[in-house]
Amino acid sequence: MITLPWPPSVNRMWRSVRGRNILSQEGRQYRENGLTVVAAQSPRHWPAEVRLSVSISVYPPDRRRRDLDNMPKAVLDLLTHAGVYVDDSQIDRLEIVRRENHPGGRVIVELRAI
């Protein structure tokens, strides 16, 4: 189980500059903070040949309406960048569940081999 900070929305995570999509300042900050958080939790690292089931529980910071389908991209990209698994193409099953609000928001990720 990995507990992560609340990510920025996909729209705020990326910027288009001269036809290229790049991480925004907010996206870079989330990645930097997230890498520190992941390293501190010392999660298991899954090799490329392992197929994964991923369960993401989101605890929103407030009661605003949010689309759950926008949530996993930032989280999964962070876990790839942190080396938790080689590539998110290893994921064969993905579950996203909205939970109760949590001050500041948080995301809990559970990974299992299939």
Image (tube, helix red, strand yellow):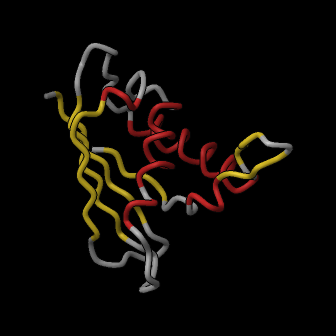
Q: Which residue is drawn at 27% across and 57% down?
A: 96
- The picture places residue 62, in percent across and down from the top left corner, at 45, 82
Kindly identify the residue that appears in the image at 41 percent across and 70 percent down. Answer: 67
Which quarter shows the C terminus? top left
Query: Looking at the picture, does residue 70 appear above or below residue 104?
Result: above
Q: Residue at x 38, y 75 (%)?
A: 102
Q: Nearer the viewer, residue 41 or 102?
A: 102
Vertically, is 10 above or below 38?
below
Report the front residue among 81 and 68.
68
Q: Residue furthest front?
A: 19
Query: Residue 29: where, in percent of width, then height?
Result: 68, 50
Relative horizontal placement of residue 39, taking residue 109 as reference (left or right): right
Q: In which quarter of the image is residue 112?
A: top left
Left or right of residue 26, residue 109 in this image: left
Q: How many marks?
A: 0
Report the front residue among 90 and 78: 90
**Image location of residue 108, percent across then percent down:** 32, 54
Residue 72 located left or right of residue 54: right
Q: Which residue is drawn at 86% across and 43% down?
A: 18
Where is 49 relative to 72, above or below?
A: above
- Image quadrant where one finds the N terminus: top left
Residue ranking furthest to the bottom: 63
Query: Which residue lies most toward the right here?
Result: 18
